[in-house]
Image (tube, helix red, strand yellow):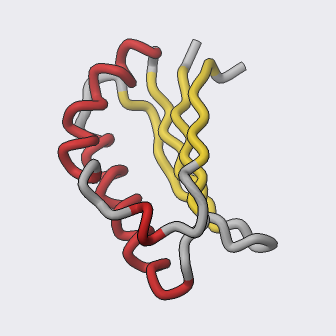
Amino acid sequence: MTYAVVSVHSPRAEHREAVIDSMKRYSKVARGQPGFVWTGIVDDDASGRLVGIAVWESASAAQAASGPLMAEVGDDPFTTWDEQPIDGLRGSVL
């Protein structure tokens, strides 16, 4: 069963491109990690929220990738860029 890591961002208008850039950098690093399956960004038409989705072969693969991923985006100033805290979801893909 695959495992998904989902991050929902509510970017401030003036920081929208910075959030997208960060999400793209995350995706680029994810693609090079063992157990990676798929990643993408959804731009919600109705709300303007950005939804990052990364799918992994397993929860352990996602966990193992967290170090390199956070090394890439962990210091990004999301508390400044986003209007609300990031809504993070993690779990098995049914």
Residue visible at 55% across and 54% down in the picture: 85
Quick one: quadrant of the C terminus? top right
Dividing the picture into quadrants, the one containing residue 42 is bottom right
Judge left or right: residue 84 versus residue 37.
right
Q: Position of residue 59 (x, y in %)?
A: 45, 16
For the residue pair 36 and 21, the one nearer the viewer reads as: 21
Judge left or right: residue 73 versus residue 20.
left
**On screen, residue 90 above or below 86:** above
Q: Position of residue 53 (x, y in %)?
A: 54, 44
**On screen, residue 8 above or below 22:** above
For the residue pair 39 and 88, the one nearer the viewer reads as: 88
Residue visible at 60% across and 46% down in the picture: 87
For the residue pair 42 and 84, the one nearer the viewer reads as: 84
**On screen, residue 33 above or below 60:** below
Dividing the picture into quadrants, the one containing residue 43 is bottom right
Residue visible at 55% across and 84% down in the picture: 13
Q: How many marks?
A: 0
**On screen, residue 91 above or below 29:** above
Judge left or right: residue 53 versus residue 70.
right
For the residue pair 31 and 26, the one nearer the viewer reads as: 26
Q: Position of residue 61 (x, y in %)?
A: 35, 19
Residue reaching furthest to the bottom? 14
Residue visible at 52% across and 34% down in the picture: 5
Quick one: quadrant of the N terminus? top right
